[in-house]
Amino acid sequence: MPDGKTILWLNKGSATQDLGIIPQQKTTYTVTLQVGRRLDGASSDFHVALSDHRGDPSGTWCVLAGNNGFITPGTWHEFTFSCPIDGSLGPPATDTLWLTIASDGPQVDIDSVSVTQNQ
């Protein structure tokens, strides 16, 4: 559950973070995050992506697309998605793994983001 401190809110924008790790083949990366909905009931589409190039779509491996309209206003919902890197990437990656979160409309609140790796 969120700790009560929103770590990110977006209004038709995006935020990207370098996770500082080189993606490994035959590894699954799992993203977990809490998505909230404003008290006034405004809802928005959002996207969460893992990539190997600063949010460049050509390097994007996995995307979670959703809408926070089903979430009760003023509350949060946990989303989890997995991104298996199956060995078909070709040569070993040299760029780090990037996480991008974007909102297509009114405010989306984000908290408790984590990325784990399993081989």
Image (tube, grey):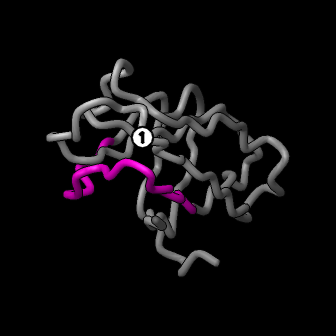
Which quarter of the rendering shows the N terminus?
A: bottom right
For label 1, the crowd category at 10 Å Cα-Cα, with few meaning under 14, some 14 to 19 and many 20 or more, is: few
Q: Quadrant of residue 46?
A: top right
Q: Is residue 10 left or right of residue 2?
A: left
Residue at the far top in the pictured view: 58
- Reply above or below: 106 against 71: above
Report x, y in % for residue 75. 73, 65
User: Which is more toward the observer, 52 or 103?
Assistant: 52
Please check the rendered image and state whether residue 31 is part of the magenta-colored stretch, yes or no: yes
- Reply above or below: 60 against 22: above
**Amino acid type of disc 1?**
Gly
Report x, y in % for residue 60. 41, 29
**Magenta segment:** 16-32
Please check the rendered image and state whether residue 64 is part of the magenta-colored stretch, yes or no: no
Q: Is residue 33 left or right of residue 74?
A: left
User: Which is more toward the observer, 88 or 38?
Assistant: 88
